[in-house]
Image (cartoon, rainbow, N blue to C red):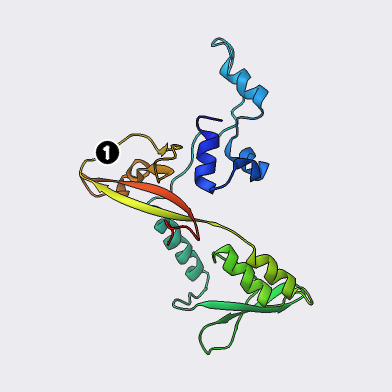
Amino acid sequence: YDLIIGPYTEKVWKIDPKELSEEVARVRVSAGNAAKLVSTMLRRADRPPPRPTALKQFTYIKGGVQGLVHTLTKKVTDAGGVFRTSTIATGFKGRDGRIEEIATHTCTPPVPVDGVISTVPLPDLTEMVASSRLHEGDGDRAEAAAARLEYIGLILVAVMINKPQVTPNSWIYFPEKHLIFNRAYEPGNFDPSMKPEGQSMLVFEVTARWDSDIWK
């Protein structure tokens, strides 16, 4: 904990790990409790390995995240759906806690909906929900709660490298305080199509509070 997990967690979230929910540790550190961890570390080589608790493999989307977007777009349009680009959602209309319409920045009438899936940043989304007064009498309280939300921003810095591969590792973690970045990864290790021929790219993750000099 003192070597990696503690300093890395504090570096990523910019807060004392003691102030974070224990759910963060449960999800991110899947070795079980301390007794299980020590038992695994001291297990004799001739004993069968314990049941795995951590993720051993994952599936990477061909072409990266844009492959996901293009596939979802095709599935929606094939099903008769319509995309409205250059349209900014400004608020919701509804009642009894249910969103029935989405207001936009244009002069067109609100868009009727059966449900909403949102990728709007959480502070903005909660403010939109609160100001929509979906619950009678809860508007002021909801807006005050939304205003107290804090969040960490993520900055991605991509560096092109004039060599086919920098490292065979999927991710590299940097818990050291004097380094501004938390983690690095090489997309070409996940999918060769994610890099030009003869080159590679390293992506560095930097987290920052919204009011910090780094973010500004």
Q: Residues within 10 Å of mark 1 (few under 14, many from 20)?
A: some
Residue 6, how many percent across, how many down?
55, 36
Residue at the (49%, 64%) spot, across then down = 75
Residue at the (65%, 26%) spot, across then down = 34
Residue at the (43%, 50%) spot, across then down = 206
Question: Which residue carries the number 1 mark?
Answer: 165
Residue 132, how many percent across, how many down?
67, 78
Q: Is residue 15 above or below residue 84?
A: above
Tell me where residue 97 sits by quadrant: bottom right
Residue at the (38%, 43%) spot, across then down = 185
Q: Amino acid at mark 1?
A: Gln
From where the camera sits, is residue 55 visible?
no
Residue 154, how many percent across, how many down?
46, 54
Residue 137, how many percent across, how many down?
79, 76
Q: Is residue 173 above or below residue 141?
A: above
Q: Nearer the viewer, residue 68 or 86?
A: 86
Q: Is residue 1 left or right of residue 159?
A: right
